[in-house]
Amino acid sequence: MKQKIENEVSCLNLSEPMNITLRYPAVGKITHEQVRWSNAIVNSPVVYGLIERRTLYFITGEVKHKYTEKNLGVPDSWKDLYFHLTDDDLGLIGGQKNVPRTYAALRELAKKLVPVTFKNEQGQLIRGEVHWVDSFFYNTETGLYDVRVSPEIMPYLIDISKSFTTFDLGTAMLLRSKYSQKMYELCSQFCGDFRFLDSGEKAQGHVYKKRVVPIQMEDFRRIFNLDEVRDPRTKKVITPAIYTSFKEVRQFILEATQMELFELYAAKHSNLWFDFQEGPRKGRGGKVSSIFIYIYTKEFPKEGIEKPWQKGDEPLSPFEEYAEPVEHTDIHQRMRENVWYNAGKEAQEIALQTLLGHYLHEDEVFYYMKQIRLKAGRSYDSYMQVIQVIQDKEKQPKFKSGTDTYRRNSIIKYALRVNLKEFGWSLEPMNATTKNKKKPIEQDLFSYR
């Protein structure tokens, strides 16, 4: 199962400043800063409680200020791995009235391990467990709490060149359950210009919409630590299974975390929220085998009314509207069989300009024709390729019955921006051409198991 991130875009720039502030001992007050974790941590099972994970978020902010912002690597000296916290810091993490509870959670961190999986230089699969905090001290004279961050975890916070997730520290600290924390991390991982690619589905004509994440239930249950966990060597039960039915998963995890993130988003305290949908079941009356997560952000909001999907709303679909194959033949073959293929270049240009004029505004036609002429100067087939993707779009029933606005958006967002990629190029909308685009990044989805 693989995915591709196309033209990666940050999804953490909120349209308005938020009203919450976090304080750090070394740097004073800051507002909603971005931090990042290796995807090995994001995709690891939930083993920490609510306050414990808030403490990890807090420590991540400290690591960022002490090392990442200064472009320092993992420190060599164990003395540099100590961080000093006060009662005020513990109050920020768990609430001013819950300092003793946060203190207890801080102590527990030193006892827990987070599972990680990776391949060594020989390509061998290695399963292991590492501490976030490997020692804890309380100074009875100064009232300081000294925590030593494990050197094994530091590379997952500092030396990250790929396969990492950026999320908003202020939002993460506001979340009220360990499951909403984990869901926020997962949504942050895929909330940019992300499109899941699956060769099997694509071969059948299906193309996933951007920011739609299909997750197999076995992966979901592992990440949320819902299944029974046994020691890989002794086979002894470490944790028992919980929420064994999908009904329980839906109620206590999916619906609960969805509502929490949506409420924070509506109150401008979160940069994202999500919808979810059951995937296919295994056999008639069988168990749900997968789910689809639809991620919405300020930059990429939900179309229509922004609210969690309810029965009676327009059905959610994980695939692009053009996913239904218009014909069985290859798009290149259809182009060669098109009546305009053997026409002269000037005739193709006139035909294309007329075709665009049926659906787009006058200034848009001028803009796109200018871009296509530049491309045509280097590639003779450019006019014909654009004609073909538009004509393919015209054959689709949903396009034929759509409104003028719908058809215009279909041409701009899909035919010109997405479908043309089958020919190795695409045309960005007018308001996006000046943005700097990063090169595509390919990586495994949920590969840290």
Image (cartoon, grey):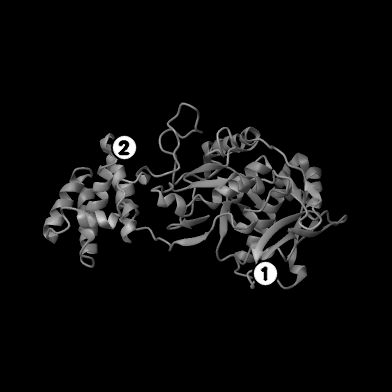
Does 409 appear above or below 192? Answer: above
**Disc 1 element:** loop
Residue type marked 1: Val
Residue 115 placement, left or right of 442:
right
Where is residue 411 drawn, in percent x and y? 28, 46
Quarter of the image for the C terminus: give it: bottom right
Closer to us: 195 or 430: 195
Residue 398 placement, left or right of 71:
left
Label 2 CA crowd tier, 10 Å (few <14, some 14–19, many 20+): some
**Disc 2 element:** helix
Closer to us: 150 or 223: 223
Disc sitting over residue 18 in the figure: none
- Residues under labels 1 and 2: Cα distance? 55 Å
Disc sitting over residue 398 in the figure: 2
Residue 197 appears in the picture as rendered: no
User: Which mark is first along the chain, 2 or 1?
Assistant: 1
* Residue at position x 69%, y 43% in the image: 226
* Residue at position x 73%, y 61% in the image: 128
Residue 119 appears in the picture as rendered: yes
Label 1 CA crowd tier, 10 Å (few <14, some 14–19, many 20+): many
Does 397 appear above or below 166? Answer: above
Provide the residue designation for mark 1: 74
Where is residue 263 drawn, in percent x and y? 56, 35
Where is residue 256 drawn, in percent x and y? 62, 35
Residue type marked 2: Lys
